[in-house]
Image (spheres, rainbow, N blue to C red):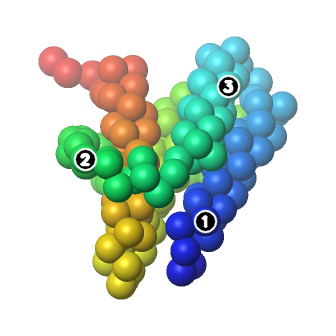
Amino acid sequence: MNTFDEVIFFAIKREEDAIQGYGSMIEVAKTPGINKLLQELQEEERKHKKLLQELTEGKVESYLPTKVIDLKISDYLEEDTLDAEMDFQQLLIFAAKKEQNAVKLYSKLAEESESEELKKLFEFLVEQEKSHKLKLETEYEKHVLEWD
């Protein structure tokens, strides 16, 4: 990936894969709560795809990175394979791990990029994925972790 358009195409393809993946899980999810969360995750990916489709080099140039906090909850959790029997916790872990992997990928690509323009684009993508991970980890903290 050597151009802005190639990176955007790659990132949009990843979002489309996520939309399709969550869609296929919606078809087999057996509980309404899981189904609702899958629909919300799918919609988040659609929004991210739209954001990427509307992103221009000028918008990235004017982008001022914001540091998204990382709760690191999913960093210490084991990911299960998703199937029709998954529960809410498994789905949150799966989705957070997916975002965590995207953060790692885009961070590595930013590090390796020789172009300042592409480095800034990858850093933008990192922050987008971190914000998705934060949202999922916040849900995990709210619904799964119990504090005494």
Identity, as a three-letter code, of the amino acid under mark 1: Asp
The tag earlier along the polypeptide, 1 or 2, is: 1
Q: Which residue is mark 2?
A: 64
Disc 3 vs disc 1: Cβ atoms closer than 8 Å? no
> Mark 3 against mark 1, which lies toward the viewer?
1
Distance of mark 3 from mark 1, alpha carbons? 29 Å
Which residue is rendered at x = 65% and y = 62% of the image?
9
Few, some or many residues within 10 Å of mark 3 (<14, 14–19, 20+): some
The tag earlier along the polypeptide, 3 or 2, is: 3
**Residue 116 pos. (x, y %):** 32, 73
Which residue is rendered at x = 63% and y = 46% of the image?
53
Q: Which residue is mark 3?
A: 39
Furthest residue in direction left, as rendered: 148
Few, some or many residues within 10 Å of mark 1 (<14, 14–19, 20+): few
Answer with left or right where residue 33 lies relative to residue 142. Answer: right
Question: Which quarter of the rendering shows the C terminus?
Answer: top left
* Foreground of the two, 85 or 128: 128
The tag earlier along the polypeptide, 3 or 1, is: 1
Which residue is rendered at x = 42% and y = 70% of the image?
118
* Foreground of the two, 130 or 89: 130
Q: Is residue 41 visible?
A: no
Q: Which residue is mark 1?
A: 5
Which residue is rendered at x = 59% and y = 60% of the image?
8
Q: Give SS at disc 1.
A: helix
Where, by quadrant of the figure, is residue 50 drawn?
Answer: top right
Identity, as a three-letter code, of the amino acid under mark 3: Gln
Disc 3 vs disc 2: Cβ atoms closer than 8 Å? no
Q: Give SS at disc 2.
A: loop
